[in-house]
Image (cartoon, helix red, strand yellow):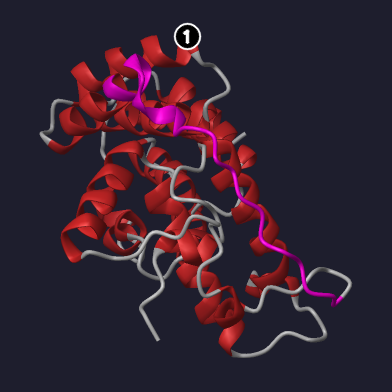
Amino acid sequence: MAELTYYDILQVHPSASEDAIRAAYFRLAKIYHPDLRRQDQRPEDTERFIEINRAYTVLLDPARRQTYDLDLQDRGAPRQADGAANAAAIETPADDGEPRPATAAPRPWAGQGEAGRAFIKAEQLVDEGRVKDAARLLLALVRVEPDNPGYLSLAGYALAKAGENLHKARDFCRRSFEMEPYNATYCARLGYVYVAAGLPKLAEKIFADALKLDPAQPLARQYAGRAQASVPSGGLMTQLKGLLSR
């Protein structure tokens, strides 16, 4: 059997919009998330959810999705027209136990416009360590699209990395994770905000939650178990501890 692509795992068309990918993820998470403890849950469902979460994290990120699509092209992987390739191998039941047909979303991908390009640039700035420049760009994007969880999460993370406006960083990261509570990356970025604010116990709890969602989440793996050693010192941090823990 051919290897399942991330589009197959989420049962979406390769041209699916971000909204369609998000909807598919939440539908599958309601079935396979290990914390749900369904009566008909099987041990392999946890592994399946990890794959679902990994696919979602990549496909909802414009830069990573673009890289993944290019890799699929290089490998010559088939991209099914109906968005449900190998669906029988996924066996997605409905909540009532009946099979649920996969849904396609043939709308163009919404991440290729000017805002999408600016977001990719912001990600590059973060990777290069130019977090203040990234934060300024992301704050502009948030003003344009205040309900975009991807913009909010990365903006909060960049602000925390820059040590600027940790209240806003916390609010952005918390809001993005509330919008997508199964996104391990958003969860881990919220944990980092608390590291930057000098709240290691709270950070450790959040990193643990992120690793439950995705044991391979890199930021959570980097800081889990050593958040205390990463706490910055200084009078400002002491003042912020009480404020950010509310």
Q: Kindly tell me whether residue 230 is visible in this rendering.
A: yes
The relative height of residue 183 versus residue 89 in the rendered view (above or below) is: above
The residue that appears at 31% across and 58% down in the rendered structure is: 223
The residue that appears at 83% across and 85% down in the rendered structure is: 39
Q: Is residue 222 magenta?
A: no
**Number of marks in the rendered image:** 1
- Mark 1 residue element: helix
Q: Is residue 241 left or right of residue 34?
A: left
Q: Which residue is mark 1?
A: 143
Q: Quadrant of the N terminus?
A: bottom left
Q: Mark 1: which amino acid?
A: Arg
Closer to the camera, 103 or 185? 103
Where does the magenta region start and end? 97-117
Q: Residue furthest front?
A: 81
The residue that appears at 37% across and 9% down in the rendered structure is: 140
Q: Residue furthest right?
A: 96
Prevailing secondary structure of the magenta residues: loop
Q: Kindly tell me whether residue 200 is visible in this rendering.
A: no
Q: Is residue 100 magenta?
A: yes
The relative height of residue 65 versus residue 225 in the rendered view (above or below) is: above
The relative height of residue 77 versus residue 189 in the rendered view (above or below) is: below
Closer to the camera, 192 or 38? 38
